[in-house]
């Protein structure tokens, strides 16, 4: 896939491919960037000191699992973006039981608004469709206007709001 580098006449050659173990170190660095960006929006997203170990384990399992799709966007042998999606199930009381869950998607700040996220999303939607899944869900931070505008631009809609309360008991 060829993309124009925003603001220049430079053409990028981009590949969106299934992630491999060799991509994990670069994906972890991008995951840290994503988490730190979200921490700036809401302290809830502060990552544990050893959080990258858990994320590495999650990524390794996803790469090997048939019900998970880990993608990387590669430009000049560099990971410019990654996404992780899984097959999931709603409670059996609902008519629509199976759905696809996009759990992570991130593009390096310097590569945003160049079509990389859209390219990964199209690959993800094709993967879900090939599995007979037509409902796709994700969780987006309410305080992330960049992410929310991306998802809305691609047709995603609100259907549920998750509310929270930090409660300090009075003893």
Image (cartoon, rainbow, N blue to C red):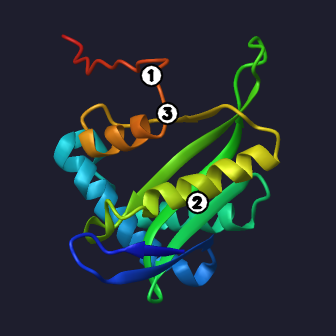
Name the element at disc 3: loop
Locate residue 84, reporting x and y percent.
Answer: 57, 56
* Residue 155, disc: 3
* Residue 166, disc: none
* Residue 58, disc: 2
CA gap between label 2 and label 1 equals 27 Å
Which badge, 2 or 1, is on the more N-terminal residue? Answer: 2
Residue 102 in sight from this viewpoint = yes
Which badge, 3 or 2, is on the more N-terminal residue? Answer: 2
Q: Nearer the viewer, residue 11 or 122?
A: 11
Locate residue 130, reporting x and y percent.
Answer: 81, 49
Between marks 3 and 2 in the image, the one whose residue lies nearer the viewer? 3
Q: Which residue reaches farthest front?
A: 9
Residue displayed at 26% across by 48% down: 38
* Position above or below: 145 against 167: below
* Position above or below: 24 against 103: below
């Amino acid at each position: 896939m060829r993309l124009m580098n925003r603001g220049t006449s430079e053409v990028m050659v981009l590949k969106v491919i299934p992630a491999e173990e060799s991509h994990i170190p670069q994906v972890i660095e991008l995951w840290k960037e994503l988490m730190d960006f979200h921490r700036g929006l809401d302290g809830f997203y502060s990552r544990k000191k050893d959080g990258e170990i858990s994320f590495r384990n999650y990524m390794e399992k996803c790469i090997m699992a048939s019900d998970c799709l880990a993608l990387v966007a590669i430009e000049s042998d560099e990971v410019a973006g990654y996404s992780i999606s899984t097959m999931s199930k709603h409670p059996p009381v609902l008519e629509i039981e199976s759905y696809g869950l996009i759990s992570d998607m991130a593009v390096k700040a310097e590569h945003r608004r160049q079509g990389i996220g859209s390219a990964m999303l199209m690959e993800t939607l094709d993967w879900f469709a090939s599995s007979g899944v037509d409902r796709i869900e994700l969780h987006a931070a309410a305080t992330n206007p960049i992410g929310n505008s991306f998802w809305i631009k691609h047709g995603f809609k609100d259907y549920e709001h998750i509310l929270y309360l930090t409660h300090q008991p009075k003893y």
